[in-house]
Image (cartoon, helix red, strand yellow):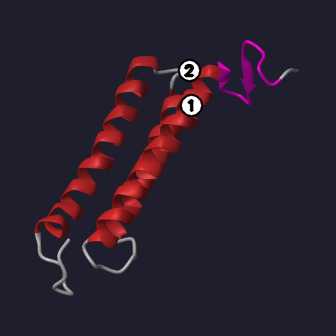
Amino acid sequence: THLFSEKTKLTGSGYISPSAALHALSVEAMGVFTLGMMSRVSLAHTGRPLVAQRGLTVAYLLVAVAAVVRVFGSGFWPIGSLLLSGLLWVIAFFLFLLLFLPILLRRRPDGLPG
């Protein structure tokens, strides 16, 4: 079969459209890249080591799980999977906010401006 045929067969779980799979992959990539850039820039500009906290790793995983839920849940729970994947995305970015707001509001540990 052609890669971009109208529907792609999933083993034992029915069909998904390639556009849904591409959408989920794009959403995951954008979410992970956005979290990665925000965390890297926030740490660097505040003079902190570039080390991902455990909570940030959880945020990355939540974005990835959201993409999986969106693709594989849409076949049997269309609206619920959309809402759940959106909720997971929101939780991931809220977790980033909880972790990084204190860092961004405090002075740099090295005393330099920034």
Q: Residue furthest bottom?
A: 110
Verify whether residue 29 appears in magenta: no
Residue at 41% x, 49% y is: 34
Verify CB contact (< 8 Å) between mark 1 and mark 2: yes
Q: Residue furthest top?
A: 6
Amino acid marked by disc 1: Phe
Residue at 35% x, 41% y is: 88
Q: Which residues are magenta?
A: 3-18
Specify the label residue 92 is tagged with: none
How many C-alpha atoms fall within 10 Å of the one at disc 1: few (<14), some, or many (≥20)? many
Residue at 61% x, 29% y is: 22
Amino acid marked by disc 2: Gly
The answer to whether residue 50 is above or below residue 35 is below
The answer to whether residue 101 is above or below residue 84 is below
How many C-alpha atoms fall within 10 Å of the one at disc 2: few (<14), some, or many (≥20)? some
Q: Is residue 47 left or right of residue 16?
A: left
Percent coordinates x, y for residue 1 in the rendering: 88, 21
Q: Is residue 50 left or right of residue 45?
A: right
Specify the label residue 72 is tagged with: 1
Which quadrant does the C terminus fall into? bottom left
Q: Which sits in the foreground, 95 or 109?
A: 109
Verify whether residue 6 appears in magenta: yes
Specify the label residue 75 is tagged with: 2
For the residue labelled by badge 2, is the local secondary structure a helix, a strand or a loop?
A: loop
The answer to whether residue 105 is above or below residue 17 is below
Percent coordinates x, y for residue 76 in the rendering: 52, 20
Q: Could you tell me if residue 16 is visible in this image?
A: no
For the residue labelled by badge 1, is the local secondary structure a helix, a strand or a loop?
A: helix
User: How far separated are the C-alphas under marks 1 and 2?
Assistant: 6 Å
Q: Which sits in the foreground, 2 or 75?
A: 2
The answer to whether residue 106 is above or below residue 90 is below
